Image (cartoon, rainbow, N blue to C red):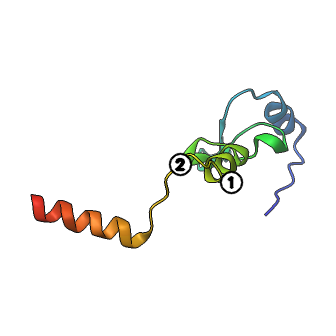
Amino acid sequence: MVVKIRDPNAVAAMEAAKSPIDVQTADGRYLGRFIPGDESNRMSFPEFGFTDVELERRANDPAVRWYTADEVMARLRQLRKSS
């Protein structure tokens, strides 16, 4: 969803931002966090702290070992038996 900002002061503050800023209503209610950057720095999940480009790179890294759900469950059963 896109929200168009029409307040020139708000637009100026967001354009000048060099780091994430919290967005609040005039009465102080928290609306969310604005993360400045161009499209190449886009973050679909900002709580992870990685750009979409970085997440894509990590997902396609041939040196990373991925585990199936069955492998994870087998390991958890093994850990439960040993405790």
Left or right of residue 79: residue 83 = left
Question: Mark 1 or mark 2: which comes first in sequence?
Answer: 1
- Secondary structure found at label 2: loop
Q: Amino acid at mark 2?
A: Val
Q: Give coordinates of residue 6: x percent, y percent.
A: 90, 48
On the image, numbered disc 2 is attached to which residue?
64
- Neighbour class for label 1 at 10 Å: few (<14), some, many (≥20)? few
In this rendering, the answer to whether 74 lies above or below 27 is below
Q: Quadrant of residue 75?
A: bottom left
* 21 or 78, nearer to the observer: 78
Q: Quadrant of residue 72?
A: bottom left
Q: Quadrant of the C terminus?
A: bottom left
Disc 1 to disc 2, C-alpha distance = 22 Å
Q: Give coordinates of residue 33: x percent, y percent.
A: 65, 44
Q: How many marks?
A: 2
Left or right of residue 5: residue 18 = left
Q: Residue at x 71, y 40 (%)?
A: 35
Q: Quadrant of the N terminus?
A: bottom right
On the image, numbered disc 1 is attached to which residue?
44
Q: Residue at x 59, y 41 (%)?
A: 49
* 4 or 54, nearer to the observer: 54
- Secondary structure found at label 1: loop
Left or right of residue 64: residue 82 = left
Picture disc at residue 71:
none
Q: Give coordinates of residue 24: x percent, y percent.
A: 65, 45
Q: Give coordinates of residue 17: x percent, y percent.
A: 76, 29
Left or right of residue 71: residue 53 = right
Q: Quadrant of residue 41?
A: top right
* 2 or 47, nearer to the observer: 47
Q: Amino acid at mark 1?
A: Ser
